Image (cartoon, rainbow, N blue to C red):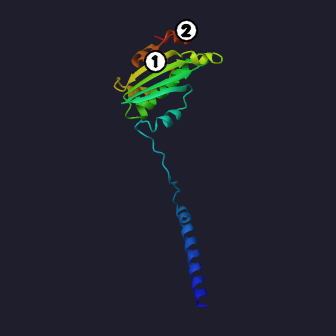
Amino acid sequence: MRAWKQLGAAAAIAVTASLVLSALPMADLAAGGTRHELAVFRAVQPKLLNYDNVVELLSGLGLQQKIKRVDLNRGVLAVDLLTGKRSTAESLNGDVLELLRLGFIRMENVERLLVRVLECPEAAGDVQASLAPSLLLSADVRKTDESLAEIIPILHAGDLLEGSWSKRLRLSYTPLWRERYGSPKS
């Protein structure tokens, strides 16, 4: 009989302690405190680009063009984008601008960014596999370029079509680009 009393008393103490502990957050709110969410898992944004995170970072950009090839070697990030004939100049330059922001604003170890925008030939069947893509645009941008870190956050995709920006960022537009989208503004 005595064992039952001890067991009952222990159960009552456990239930009381549970109720008191669960009421503590409410007591803080009743006393005028504010409720703060506490993150258990914090998403840490990587600052260094490497082969372990390059796929995640590039796929997270939401580029409108397909990525054909990526190479990362001693601070040089080289990306080939593959596009179709229905792409606009604004969407192509928007993707280049996103790559610039990733390489030079978000990452600390990218010293040079090489981008090529290639147009995939639209042919039927097995013929398409044998046709090489045509170059539309290439970019060679270096972190050491004057005030690059201040310029990139304020640029818009349309700004890259201006001649002064294309010279400053070393953007080269091919004759195929000029035929399809026109020459950059001087």
Which label was assigned to residue 138?
1
Q: From this viewpoint, is residue 41 visible? A: yes
Which label was assigned to residue 64?
none
Which element carries disc 2, helix, strand or loop? Answer: helix
Q: Is residue 13 left or right of residue 171?
A: right
Mark 2 lies on residue: 179
Residue 21 placed where, x, y %?
54, 69
Q: Nearer the viewer, residue 103 or 37?
A: 103
Q: From this viewpoint, is residue 155 visible? A: no
Pick out the residue farthest to the bottom.
1
Residue 176 placed where, x, y %?
53, 10
Q: Is residue 152 left or right of residue 20?
A: left
Corner quadrant of residue 112: top left
Residue 63 placed where, x, y %?
54, 28
Residue 29 placed where, x, y %?
54, 61
In the picture, the quarter occupied by the C terminus is top left
Count of number-bearing discs: 2
Q: Is residue 124 left or right of residue 50?
A: right
Residue at 36 percent of width and 28 percent of height: 111
**Label 2 to label 1, Cα distance in Å?**
16 Å
In the rendered view, would you say 73 is above or below 162?
Answer: below
Type of the residue with mark 1: Ser
Residue at 45 percent of width and 14 percent of height: 172
